[in-house]
Amino acid sequence: MFLTFLTFLPIVGALLLAFIPREEEGAIKQTALAFAVTDFVLSVFLWTNFDSTTHEMQFEYSVPWISSWGINYHVGLDGISLLLYVMTTFLTVIAIIASWGITKNIREYMMAFLALSTGMLGVFVSLDMFLFYF
């Protein structure tokens, strides 16, 4: 369940940005950065709690999603996907800092970037083909 929270944290930040007035560029940038840094720090927590002595999926969570088609919401991490997950959260922080100079449509940009981050993270944790593509 923690992995789901961590994966969808950036989209929560993107939705929160929608309620910040467009003129508050500093608050928009700081909020986006705060969500990205929080996601990175929590992903490092995943890394420190990862058991590298096993080849099994870890932090696994599965619930029926569309039962009539046999589709489940199934997420988890293995060694490779964990490294890609942590790297993605780190690069998200770097990209938000690098885009600090943007002045046009900053709220929409940061919202789109945080939504993109959620999508990228979802690719690395998805263990169901339907979830992977949608």
Image (tube, helix red, strand yellow):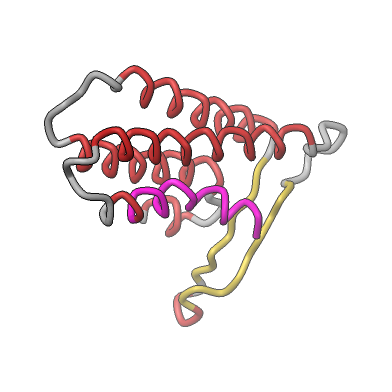
Q: In which quarter of the image is residue 16?
A: bottom left
Q: Position of residue 55 (x, y in %)?
A: 79, 38
Q: Image quadrant for the C terminus?
A: bottom left
Q: Which residue is drawn at 34% across and 49% down?
A: 14
- The residue most toward the left is 104
Whether residue 5 appears in magenta in the rendering, the answer is yes
Q: Which one is nearer the viewer's eye here, 66 or 34?
A: 34
Q: Quadrant of residue 99?
A: top left
Q: How many marks?
A: 0
In the depicted structure, whether residue 76 falls above or below residue 95: below
Q: Which one is nearer the viewer's eye here, 108 or 53?
A: 108
Compared across the picture, whether 45 is left or right of 64 comes to: right
Q: Where is residue 129 in the image (x, y as percent from the top left)?
A: 47, 54
Q: Which residue is drawn at 65% across and 55% down?
A: 2
Compared across the picture, whether 112 is left or right of 129 comes to: left
Q: Quadrant of residue 117?
A: top left
In the depicted structure, whether residue 51 falls above or below residue 15: above
**Which portion, as a residue range, is magenta?**
1-15
Whether residue 109 appears in magenta in the rendering, the answer is no
Q: Where is residue 62 in the image (x, y as percent from the top left)?
A: 63, 65
Q: Image quadrant for the N terminus?
A: bottom right
By secondary structure, the bulk of the magenta-drawn segment is best described as: helix
